[in-house]
Amino acid sequence: MKIVKVEAIPFAIPYVKPLRFASGEVHTADHVLVRVHTDEGLVGTAEAPPRPYTYGETQDSVVAVIEKIFAPQILGLTVLEREVVHARLDRTVGNPAAKAAVDMALWDLLGQCAGLPVSGLLGGFGDRMRVSHMVGFAPADVMVAEAERIRDTYGITTFKVKVGRNPYTEDVAACRALRTALGPDVELYVDGNRGWSASDAARALREMADLDLTFAEELCPADDVLGRRWLVAQSQVPFIADESATRAAEVTRELLGGSATAISIKTARTGFTASQRVLHQCEGLGVEMVMGNQIDGQIGTLCSVAFGAAHRSSSLHAGELSNFLDMSDDLLTEPLTIADGTLRVREGAGLGIAIDPEKLARYRLDV
Ligand code: MUC
Ligand code: MG
């Protein structure tokens, strides 16, 4: 059960259609495959999606921090010493996606060692999640056509609409077009990725008051401290902290400071161990949560659904699990499928991740 090798393999898979949002855009999944090997020949797998515009990590920085700092710190530890692993990784500040991938690969190993699925070890609440699809920036008619296609093809009826463009009226019009086209049975919520000022966000929320939005997420920067509190105090819907609450301490600060009233949990940045802490923190405080998407590939999505389905509180709302649909390919031998608006947890020991060696050879950047 001893960790004998940690691999950080950069790979790049193009998107069929880029995802655009207020803080950036993604054309290629330039992720890092993380594999942790044990002395018994088991391999734990996860992926790290670097998001420079959100956390400052890049593909090169993820590879470097894992190879140069994390791997030497954890070689020789056993899979059961996860608290020791975290104590060592936490000597380095930041680098959330790199740390999360190491954590999830260790959970994958734990499951394989025990012969049990990770989702069951985490909580075993259910075997699937309802899926929420994220609709990126485009002209309103294109956003409507995408949502209709996703609904008709995959049965998805929850949509997170990216907002945060200026002028804000463009987004208000797009949300109105979506509600008109999709009707009242579809769930809609908005994510501004800090693109608006607090005052424009307040105007936008007022103008969308009749659209029956479920949530509003990061409409203005949390660093605009008083403006954000003023906005959240008047929001008629729970206000989700995403990139402003990426660690348990930030969750506490945002919630107690009145800068958020709900939390996005992303396994891509908090792995399973820290995500579970945040989940329990939210449960204890009586705060709703959504399983967010860090524009994950299929490996990351499998991790996210394994965690989200494992707990009652993270299964209450649809999880953001469908952005891999925009990628031209992926690394799994058996691709994920979304049907009837749901994604199932993969069965088998660990996370059930099997990597196609030919695809990895085609997309890896380090050979
Ligand atoms: C989201 O919910 O904000 C965009 C940037 C990122 O890190 O995640 C996405 C989606
Ligand atoms: Mg967000």
Image: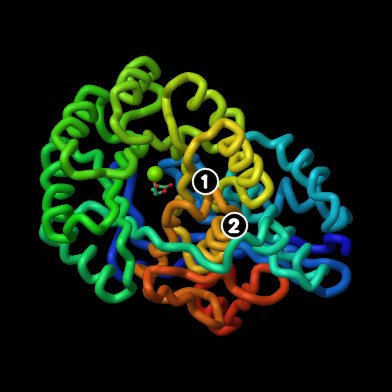
Residue 325 screen position, x and y as percent: 37, 70
Can residue 294 be seen at all in this image of the molecule? no
On residue 307, which mark appears? 2
The mark that comes first in sequence, 2 or 1, is 1
Q: Relative to the observer, which residue lies in front, 13 or 309?
A: 309
- State how far apart marks 2 and 1 are (Cα): 10 Å
For the point 34% across and 68% down, the residue is 326
Q: Is mark 2 within 8 Å of ligand 1?
A: no
For the point 53% across and 51% down, the residue is 314
Contact check, label 2 and label 1, Cβ < 8 Å: yes
Residue at the far top in the pictured view = 226
Q: Is residue 116 left or right of residue 296?
A: right
Q: Relative to the observer, which residue lies in front, 261 or 199?
A: 261
Q: Is residue 75 left or right of residue 262?
A: right
Q: Disc 2 residue type? A: Phe
**In the rendered image of this protein, does residue 259 appear above or below residue 9?**
above
Q: Disc 1 residue type? A: Ile
Res 306 quadrant in image:
bottom right
Residue 134 screen position, x and y as percent: 33, 56
Task: For label 1, count other residues whose C-alpha is less than 10 Å away and answer few (under 14), some (14-19) or many (20+).
Answer: many
Please state the total of marks drawn on the protein image: 2
On residue 265, which mark appears? 1
Q: Quadrant of the N terminus?
A: bottom right
